[in-house]
Image (cartoon, rainbow, N blue to C red):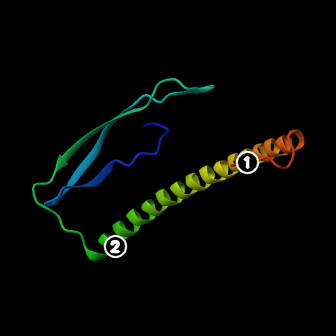
Amino acid sequence: MSRFNVMNHLKTIVYDETNMRLFDMYVTEIKGGTEIKGGVDTPTTIELMGTLSDEPIELDPTTMVRIAEYNESKKLERIKQEIKYVERSKHELVQQLHSLQAKVKKCKDFIEDTIGEEYDYD
């Protein structure tokens, strides 16, 4: 066995628009993953064997709620990441705006000092 903690029996729900089926997977062999000083010598490979059930499955309401809550929490995390990205972008744009406003002010001040106050900026 490897130093990795691996579950020997995995159950996965496979679904499409019409029904859900249970996919049973079993770990048949774990190879590699020998640890040497400074890192891992060989990559770990896991061989799986699986079967797809013939009968459609139905989930109990509690499990359906748990799946929905999990999906919503993942969706919320993605939205929060998008908000952070947009806020960073907004902050950068505001900084660029202030920089450009400062440059325009310097140009106006230079024109006023050079030509005088009767210059039409439009």
Position of 17 compared to 117: left or right?
A: left
Q: What residue type is labelled 1?
A: Tyr
Q: Where is residue 112 in the image (x, y as percent from the top left)?
A: 85, 45
Cα gap from disc 1 to disc 2, whole angstroms? 64 Å
Q: What residue type is labelled 2?
A: Val
Of pointers 1 and 2, the one earlier in the residue sequence: 2
Instruction: Please report the residue visible at 80 percent of the width from the left and 47 percent of the height from the top.
Output: 105
- Is residue 65 placed above or below 54 in the rendered structure? below
- Is residue 3 placed above or below 97 in the rendered structure? above
- SS type, badge 1: loop
Nearest the viewer among 120 and 95 is 120
| Picture disc at residue 121 | 1
Q: For the view shown, which residue lies furthest in the front direction?
A: 118
Instruction: Please report the residue visible at 69 percent of the width from the left and 46 percent of the height from the top.
Output: 96
**Residue for badge 2:** 65
Classify mark 1: residues with Cα within 10 Å, few (<14), some (14-19) or many (20+).
few
Q: Where is residue 57 in the image (x, y as percent from the top left)?
A: 17, 64
Position of 85 compared to 8: left or right?
A: right
Classify mark 2: residues with Cα within 10 Å, few (<14), some (14-19) or many (20+).
few
Nearest the viewer among 7 and 98 is 98
Q: Position of residue 86 (x, y in %)?
A: 56, 54
Nearest the viewer among 9 and 100 is 100
Position of 38 compared to 80: left or right?
A: right
- SS type, badge 2: helix
Give the position of the N terminus as an image quadrant. Answer: top left
Nearest the viewer among 54 and 19 is 19
Q: Position of residue 88 (x, y in %)?
A: 62, 51
- Is residue 105 placed above or below 30 in the rendered structure? below
Is the Cβ of the residue at disc 1 closer than 8 Å to that at disc 2? no
Q: For the view shown, which residue lies furthest in the left direction?
A: 54
